[in-house]
Amino acid sequence: MKRLVPLWIASIAGITVIVSNFIPVALGMSDLVTQMFQVLAAVAYVLGAASIAKVHLGKLSAKRPGWGYSIVVLGCFAITLFAGLLKIGALPADRAPYLPYSGKYDSEGSVVWWIYEYAISPITSTMFAMLAFYVASAAFRAFRAKNVEAILLLGTAFIILLGRTAAGAYLTGWFPDEIGGLKLENLSLYIMLVFNTAGNRAIIIGIALGVAATSLRILLQIDRSYLGSGE
Amino acid sequence: MLRFLETLDRRWIFLAMGLAVSIPILLELRFPEKSGSLTDAAFKAINELPKGSRVLLSFDFDPASEPELGPMATSFVRHCALRGYKMYFISLWPFGPPMIVEKIGEVLTKDFPNLKPGVDFVDLGFQAGNEAIMTQAKSDFKKTFPRDTSGIAVDQIPMMAEIRTTRDFAAIIMVSAGYPGGKEWIQYVITPERGRAVPLRAVVGCTGVQMPQLIPYYPGQLDGMIGAIKGAAEYETLVNALANTGDAMAVTPPKYLEAVRRMGPQLFAHVLMVSLIVLGNVIYFAGRRRGATA
């Protein structure tokens, strides 16, 4: 029973969504399934939060290496959760001027806004910006023209890197129209539209066929590996 | 010299990259942009819509990708406002709503004070559920986004009266940094709507990393694409030209030149990368030759 119920839920939900694409009457049922998915997604957020708390509390109590970072994680987690759940506003709301912090919780100056503006935004931007430094270092040490494939890769990288900046126009902008296709900006676009599209379309079609086959196996209860049984 | 380069401390490379990025910013170096076919197609697809068209703008990005996607989002909003379209803002990313608020404040509130919230534009905020939200919006948009971000029920918002499903939009503009984003919109919403008598127009603005994944959908499912900061700079130039039409003395505010400004650091950083790759290979082959002769 423990395995049978999830299997039938998956089959019925999947078949309902497929059928609704062909029979408009079943659209309501499909919407119901979608709403159930949204509820599940919301529960997954709670589970995710509980999992983070469990992992870091365990690390903290066992004083495993790096436990200090767990304090930071749990502290940030608690503050954000507290501010979000209690919907602490910045200024008194118009309808309750005698209640401080009763304004909109996501308005400018609120705790959530402050966390976003002065913590999340600069931290994530910095993390992303640091990529440029590590990519430059990796480019210097790892990109070697050791064989034909590597030479092709490097050649393509040069065309794209230069073609996607004003350098392309400066280096090859003087080419006459008869050989305009060899201008770096045109070459980079050509590589994207022809070689990249051909390769990517093949991958997309392959993935789509794989997804269709796997979905059918799940709907027909042949594939049960998503239950974690290893079957 | 070769020995020094072979054992070069990577902090020198970090310093070089830091200078390559900061010098063009400090010197405010700007370079002219000539639009490519993908950007031209995107501009045309948006520009050709009739005045008053309903456009869905999905801002599926966060602060990490803001430097790359923020300027194009600004240009999309400005273009729609210049053309007099009705704008419906949504986000499927939890950190997307502040991006919407920022662009509304930066563009609509400051430069288009005649546009009224609820009449000309509406911020419907974030909904969790990824593809499920897309499929639900396809069958019942109001149920999927029941309130705007100020808490007003969509039934009381004038511009929502004519919206039932995603079929009621003339175009969808996606600013996409990953999952869920442009690819999912194409698969779940756009593709089925492309077969209708007046097809749903679709334009995506994406990061450089996403470009190779989304280009295969052009021109079948996508009418145009703004790719990375280069595409944003090209599109920004086109939108600025549209805004300044008939006014040769018009001065474009710096906030509408952000993408062009950010192309300066990109140029220097890319040239440095190419130089580093070449230098790395010179050192590698020189070292091999020396090893062979020793």
Image (spheres, grey):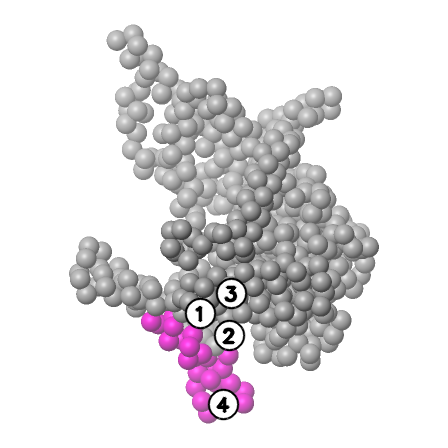
Residue B233, relative to residue B172: is it above or below?
Answer: above
Q: Which chain letter matches label 3? A: A
| CA distance separating discs 3 and 2 | 41 Å
Where residue A209 sits: x, y (%)? 58, 43
- Give the residue at mark 1: A43
Characterize the local packing of mark 4: few (<14), some (14-19) or many (20 or more) Cα atoms within 10 angstroms. few
- Give the residue at mark 4: A97
- Give the residue at mark 2: A107
User: Residue type at mark 3?
Assistant: Ile
| Residue drawn where x is 66% and y is 57% of the image | B189
| CA distance separating discs 3 and 1 | 17 Å
**In terms of sequence position, does the residue under pointer 2 or pointer 1 come before the other?**
1
Determine which of the numbered discs, if any, sits on residue B278 in the image: none
Given this view, does label 2 or label 1 mark the residue nearer the observer?
Answer: 1
| CA distance separating discs 3 and 4 | 50 Å
**In terms of sequence position, does the residue under pointer 2 or pointer 4 come before the other?**
4
| CA distance separating discs 2 and 4 | 16 Å
Given this view, does label 3 or label 2 mark the residue nearer the observer?
Answer: 3
Q: Which chain letter matches label 1? A: A
Where residue B105 sits: x, y (%)? 60, 66
Labels 3 and 4 share a subunit: yes
| CA distance separating discs 4 and 1 | 35 Å
**In terms of sequence position, does the residue under pointer 4 or pointer 1 come before the other?**
1
- Give the residue at mark 3: A9
| Residue drawn where x is 47% and y is 81% of the image | A91
User: Residue type at mark 1?
Assistant: Val
Labels 3 and 2 share a subunit: yes
The kind of secondary structure element at disc 4 is: loop
